[in-house]
Image (tube, helix red, strand yellow):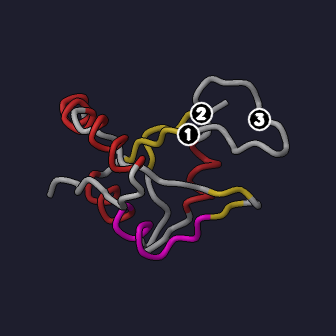
């Protein structure tokens, strides 16, 4: 079934004067999670790029990370080119993690 209406309700209106327009939303194909497992991932496509950017900024600062007793995480979709560049740091990240060093990769502006 179309997850769009469910996702629109879950996301709420945030800083927007009216409900967000979504072009689509769907769950990844996977078995239904058990009671103690996290929910399946959902991909959402915003109708307006400006709404997406505004929502991502707002969610990072103010949005509750729980929905119906499940933790919700929001990630920006990376282009294949950027994902490849970020993957180039995987070995360095493993070494840093092994040494207990806190680190992060900055998102491009």
Image point 65% across, 64% down: which residue?
A: 66
Look at the image and say whether residue 1 sits in the magenta stretch: no
Residue at 49% across, 62% down: 19
Q: CA distance from mark 2 to mark 3?
A: 12 Å
Find the distance from the CA under tag 1 to the CA under tag 2.
4 Å
Depth check: give the residue in front, 48 or 104. Answer: 104
Q: Position of residue 42 (x, y in %)?
A: 55, 39
Q: Is residue 64 magenta?
A: yes
Mark 3 or 1: the one toward you: 3
Residue holding disc 1? 42
**Left of 88 or right of it: where is 97?**
right
Q: Earlier in the sequence, mark 1 or mark 2?
A: 2
Image mark for residue 33: 3
- Main secondary structure along the magenta-highlighted residues: helix
Residue 27: image tag = 2
| Vertical relation: 43 (above or below) 69 | above
Q: Quadrant of the C terminus?
A: bottom left
Considering the numbered disc 1 on the image, is that residue within a helix, a strand or a loop? strand
How far apart marks 3 and 1 lie (CA) works out to: 13 Å
Neighbour tally class for label 2: few under 14, some 14-19, many 20 plus, Cα within 10 Å? some
Choose between 65 and 13: the one closer to the eye: 65
In the rendered image, the quadrant that contains the N terminus is top right
Nearer the N terminus, badge 3 or badge 1?
3
Q: Quadrant of residue 15?
A: bottom left
- Whichever of callouts 2 and 3 sits on the residue coming sooner in the sequence is 2
Residue visible at 39% across and 63% down in the picture: 55
Q: Are marks 1 and 2 in contact (CB under 8 Å)?
A: yes
Q: How many marks?
A: 3
* Residue at x 42% of width, y 57% of height: 100
Q: Say which element carries label 3.
A: loop
Identify the element where label 2 is drawn. strand
Q: Quadrant of residue 72?
A: bottom right
């Amino acid at each position: 079934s179309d997850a769009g209406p469910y996702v629109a309700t879950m996301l709420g209106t945030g800083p927007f004067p009216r409900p967000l327009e979504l072009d689509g939303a769907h769950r990844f194909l996977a078995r239904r999670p058990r009671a103690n497992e996290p929910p399946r991932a959902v991909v959402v496509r915003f109708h307006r790029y400006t709404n997406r950017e505004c929502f991502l900024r707002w969610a990072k600062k103010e949005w509750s990370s729980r929905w119906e007793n499940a933790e919700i995480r929001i990630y920006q979709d990376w282009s294949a080119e950027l994902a490849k560049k970020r993957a180039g740091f995987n070995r360095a990240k493993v070494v840093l993690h092994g040494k207990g060093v806190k680190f992060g990769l900055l998102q491009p502006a």
